[in-house]
Amino acid sequence: MQDPIYLKPETLDRALDYLTEYPQATLWAGGTDLIVHLEHKKLKVSGIIDLTSIPELRFIEDCGDKVRIGALTTIYEIQTSPVIKKEFAFLAQAALVLASWQIRTLATIGGNIVTAAPSAETGCPLILLDGNIIVQSKNGERKIPTNQFFKGPGKCDLAPGEIVKEIELEKLPHGYQTIYQKERLRRSMDIALANAACVLNLDGDKCQEVRIGLGAVAPVPMRAVKTEAVLNGQVMSDELVEKAAQTAASECKPITDIRATADYRRDLIYALVKRQLTALWKAGAE
Amino acid sequence: MKIPISLTVNGDKYDVMVSPLSKLVDVLRDDLLITGPKKGCAEGECGACTVIMDGKPVSSCLVLAPQADGKEITTIEGLEREDGTLDPIQEEFMNSAAIQCGYCSPGMMIMSKALLMVNPHPTEEEVRDALSGNLCRCTGYQQIVDAVMAAAEKERGGE
Ligand SMILES: Cc1cc2nc3c(=O)[nH]c(=O)nc-3n(C[C@H](O)[C@H](O)[C@H](O)COP(=O)(O)OP(=O)(O)OC[C@H]3O[C@@H](n4cnc5c(N)ncnc54)[C@H](O)[C@@H]3O)c2cc1C
């Protein structure tokens, strides 16, 4: 086998030049998905454009009403960032349960969203936040709302010649709480059987606004709109939470695969939604 | 086409020619003959190849060799102090009988080192979390966790 060409640009511009010159080359970030594909012989590499030496793509910046996250920011950096912990606690929680520490050091948020696994850890938090995935090509910049980026298992809204540059996220208004949880068979190194994220704003016991995201139970991380409709404007109660959890279990669209059956995944979603709503409701009432 | 990289491993600088798709674990083991890091699964699942790169733990099977250019790597061989005394982690792994076949041990000890570097006072839960990406198929994990707790205690005592 001929060795692929290896390119290590230090600016985004340079990376885009290389991508124009070698359109077949693979964009390489942490490599934690790519090497697995390579080992399973599901990937042929004719060229590598290593993005890990581009400092302008690796940052977390608090810009007042927004937070910007560079695509090459690692999952470990997200897990430990004071800004992320403060503004989007559930994104830090999701980062903390992605793979293992020795993978989180390498894995990037850009790689996580481009891989577009239905179970992707950062998927649910991102689709619940207002913001954009910003991609760059030789023709300029394109902003894709976070809830429109995922297109199917392994598919996202990224065209040839484009590189994910950053994720910009609007901060949540004061008083909004968030939570992320995942169900898996092992403590580490296991992708989710199901995961869920929730954003809740309460006024006393009244649900002013709720956003619920469900992962690994549809082709893309999905927004549970019917469940949200059950809750919005209502006074929280055990009965309401029960009804919401049942609605979530029925509106998700899981499949049976090697990890779990569709029915079991529905049961997990029921449990996750119930647990999350109860936790945020009780915390909010304190 | 092979490309030149230079990296520092356990304080020694090496210049090597590598294929772009070769992995750090293979360069360490096959080119530099530093065989502490073990190659278990080759896809990030088992933790046996864990090394510390620029102060942070990584699975060396998931790092392309060219990505290690200019980096500082610590393997189990580098835990021993210059005067030949062992790191408290190594001593406590022996004292607690945390080693049976030994295959996972270099990865376990390096991961423990990475933890104690950022968190010198871990709880047992934090130790279990940190080591949750390292598989052991012999001893079970209790002795390993005991060893790390004892090493942390010892390092604190020496402060
Ligand atoms: C053992 C193991 C356990 C895992 N567990 C989990 C888990 O629990 N949860 C989870 O969500 N994931 C898990 N993963 C998957 C993986 O670690 C994550 O998806 C990770 O975030 C991928 O990031 P990366 O930087 O390593 O991506 P890479 O492997 O470098 O790239 C992934 C894809 O994204 C593309 N890409 C990367 N960056 C860009 C960019 N800036 N612009 C355009 N394209 C880009 C690449 O070309 C490639 O197609 C696991 C992986 C392993 C090996």
Image (spheres, rainbow, N blue to C red):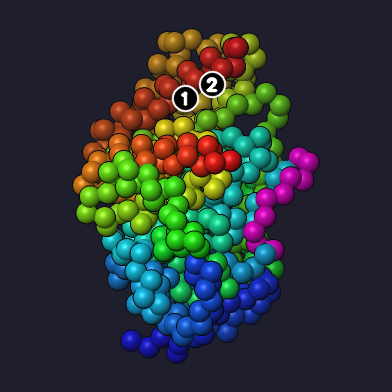
Q: Nearer the viewer, residue B90 or B141?
A: B90
Query: Residue sitting at 34 percent across and 69 percent down?
Result: B35
The answer, for residue A170, to whether it is visible in the render is: yes
In the picture shown, does residue A28 fall above or below A240? below
Side of A202 relative to B42 (left or right): right
Q: Amino acid at mark 1?
A: Gln
Looking at numbered disc 2 in the image, what kind of residue is underneath it?
A: Leu
Locate residue A184, reporting x and y percent.
33, 38
Where does label 2 land, which residue?
A280
Residue at 49% in and 50% down: B114
Q: Tell me the residue at 64%/68% (across/down).
A: A54
In the image, is A62 to the left or to the right of A24? right
Give the chain letter at badge 1.
Answer: A
Secondary structure of the residue carrying numbered label 2:
helix
Whether residue A127 can be seen here: no
Where is the C terminus of chain B found, in terms of image quarters? top right
Residue B50 pos. (x, y %): 40, 58
Q: Is residue B67 above or below residue B90?
A: below
Can residue A217 be found in the magenta stretch?
Answer: no
Residues in magenta, as a range = A56-65
Q: What is the tally of numbered marks visible in this picture?
A: 2
The residue to which callout 1 is attached is A276
The location of residue A162, given as percent across then percent down, is 58, 68
Whether residues under marks 2 and 1 lie with C-beta atoms below 8 angstroms apart, the answer is yes
Residue at image coords 38%, 88%: A2
Does A92 sit above or below residue A37?
above
Question: Tag 1, which secondary structure?
Answer: helix
The residue sitting at the front extreme is B83
Q: Chain of mark 2?
A: A
